[in-house]
Image: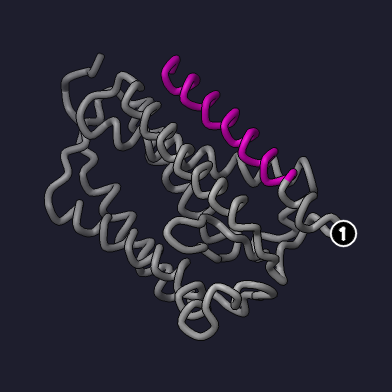
């Protein structure tokens, strides 16, 4: 439980920092309405590069903490899922406290910027984050669970992840194809493909859940 508590503390604290930065960015780019980023406004090239670096640094920190978690083998991966999931849930919780957003789980957000802006309603990353947090937390707390992924599990996880990422970045692909980078200025998302999203989610869930196996040996 001590390990779970420490990983939880890190994730929630990191989410506070992330949401604080986003609050400052909204005050700069959307001073009249902090609760909506659409129509989208363009960042300066310098600020955009800094944001890419910040997101990369966040990923590096998550990976580092998972590797330093003391878990063995594939349990490190589930520690990473837990850290990411709880961080993302806490991120939206802190934003709700700071600026009263999201107003609804249907509100659209720019979720990520690498390699292109990811766009989706708040519930789409929240569902994934909740699944990751619950599954990863279950593995961390239960020392008799020893994940043993087979090739089919890994392929399902990768395929599901790739499908979901493609759904998130597809609007950006279309913007670049039709209008180039300038097309992002004033962009407003109009919909979200639920059926492909849930197909990706099912593949992802199978890839994460199927390797979980109980062992008689209690892991130290």
Q: Could you classify mark 1 by the number of other residues whose Cα lies within 10 Å: few (under 14), some (14-19), or many (20 or more)? A: few
Q: Position of residue 59 (x, y in %)?
A: 43, 40
Q: Position of residue 207 (x, y in %)?
A: 26, 53
Q: Is residue 163 magenta?
A: no
Q: 69 or 28: nearer the eye?
A: 28
Residue at 51% from the left image edge and 63% from the top image edge: 117
Question: Which color mode does the image show?
Answer: one colour
User: Looking at this rendering, what residue extends furthest in the left direction?
Assistant: 151
Residue at 76% from the left image edge and 56% from the top image edge: 29
* Secondary structure type for disc 1: loop
The answer to whether residue 131 is left or right of residue 209 is right
Q: 69 or 75: nearer the eye?
A: 69
Tell me where residue 203 sits by quadrant. Answer: bottom left
Residue at 50% from the left image edge and 72% from the top image edge: 172
* In the image, residue 65 above or below residue 165: above
Tell me where residue 119 sits by quadrant. Answer: bottom right
* Majority secondary structure of magenta residues: helix
Residue at 35% from the left image edge and 67% from the top image edge: 163
Q: Position of residue 145 (x, y in %)?
A: 25, 30
Q: 93 or 147: nearer the eye?
A: 93
> Where does the N terminus fall, quadrant-wise?
top left
The answer to whether residue 218 is left or right of residue 85 is left
In this rendering, the count of numbered labels is: 1
Q: Position of residue 204 (x, y in %)?
A: 32, 57
User: Looking at this rendering, what residue extends furthest in the front direction?
Assistant: 46
Residue range corresponding to the magenta coloring: 1-24
> Where does the C terminus fall, quadrant-wise?
top left
Residue bearing mark 1 = 32
Q: Is residue 9 magenta?
A: yes
User: Looking at this rendering, what residue extends furthest in the bottom direction?
Assistant: 178
């Amino acid at each position: 439980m001590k390990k779970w508590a420490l990983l939880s503390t890190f994730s929630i604290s990191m989410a506070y920092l992330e949401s604080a930065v986003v609050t400052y960015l909204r005050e700069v780019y959307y001073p009249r309405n902090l609760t909506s980023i659409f129509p989208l406004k363009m960042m300066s090239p310098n600020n955009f590069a800094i944001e890419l670096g910040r997101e990369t640094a966040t990923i590096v920190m998550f990976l580092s903490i998972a590797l330093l978690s003391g878990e063995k083998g594939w349990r490190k991966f589930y520690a990473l899922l837990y850290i990411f999931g709880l961080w993302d849930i806490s991120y939206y919780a802190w934003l709700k406290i700071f600026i009263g957003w999201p107003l609804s789980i249907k509100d659209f957000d720019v979720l990520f910027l690498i390699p292109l802006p990811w766009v989706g309603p708040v519930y789409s990353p929240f569902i994934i984050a909740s699944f990751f947090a619950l599954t990863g937390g279950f593995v961390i707390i239960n020392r008799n669970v020893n994940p043993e992924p087979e090739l089919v599990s890994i392929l399902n996880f990768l395929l599901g992840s790739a499908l979901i990422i493609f759904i998130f970045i597809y609007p950006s692909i279309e913007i670049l194809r039709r209008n180039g980078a300038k097309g992002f200025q004033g962009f407003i998302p109009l919909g979200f493909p639920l059926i492909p999203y849930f197909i990706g989610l099912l593949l992802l869930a199978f890839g994460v859940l199927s390797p979980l196996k109980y062992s008689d040996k209690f892991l130290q």
